[in-house]
Amino acid sequence: MANDFNMPINFEALAVNNVRVSEDIFVSKDYITFDTELVDKAISRFCQNEFISILDVNTFTAFPECGYRWTSYLLESYLYSYSKMFILKHKAFNKTSVAGAIVRKNSCFTDYLDIMALALANADIPLDEKSSLDFLAQNGYIERRRLNTINEVIRKAEKMKLS
């Protein structure tokens, strides 16, 4: 409907009462249930440390039935609203893709810039703007090769590499 009026979609507002099951399908939270213990257990198989890119969950065979086919969009919604062990950290919800990090709730990471900086610090890449943006986009931390705060993230990554 937003496309009919040439208006942007407020995905943050949609996420309050809905679960995104695909790029363009949203379902009311009243019509979906999750076995949070089993879903969190499935996520734990991928996220064995403090965080991973949401795209690191690249198969959903271990995820329990919830009435809809598991996708990255459904995982994003689950993390945003339901998980007891994990949280979603990202810049924003995106219209055509999923990007961000799955972070353990008991992790010391609260700032998404710090998460991206550590991902860069642990990557075997030069810490320049192009290489950093390429890495973050290719690994699912950002949607596009554009980030206003990339220089700050690189500075943090450089400090992390030194310590």
Image (tube, rainbow, N blue to C red):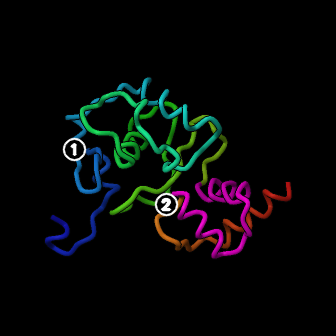
Q: In this view, does 122 lie above or below 149?
A: above
- Left-right relation of 26 to 38: left
Q: In this view, does 129 lie above or below 43?
A: below
**Three-letter code, disc 2:** Lys
Judge the density around disc 1: few (<14), some (14-19), many (≥20) Cα neighbours within 10 Å.
Answer: some
- Left-right relation of 84 to 49: left
**Three-letter code, disc 1:** Val
- Left-right relation of 141 to 162: left
Question: In the structure shown, which secondary structural element does the residue marked by tag 2 occupy?
Answer: loop
Magenta span: predominant SS is helix
Question: Mark 2 = which residue?
Answer: 91
Q: Quadrant of residue 154?
A: bottom right
Question: In the structure shown, which secondary structural element does the residue marked by tag 1 occupy?
Answer: strand
Q: Does the magenta stretch include residue 137?
A: yes
Q: In which quarter of the image is residue 97?
A: bottom left
Residue 18: where, in percent of width, then height?
26, 45
Residue 147: where, in percent of width, then height?
55, 71
Q: Looking at the figure, which quarter contains the C terminus? A: bottom right
Question: Mark 1 = which residue?
Answer: 27
Farthest residue in the right direction?
Answer: 162
Residue 121: where, in percent of width, then height?
73, 58
Could you tell me how far apart the alpha carbons at marks 1 and 2 are, in whole angstroms?
A: 23 Å
User: The magenta stretch spans which residues?
Assistant: 112-140
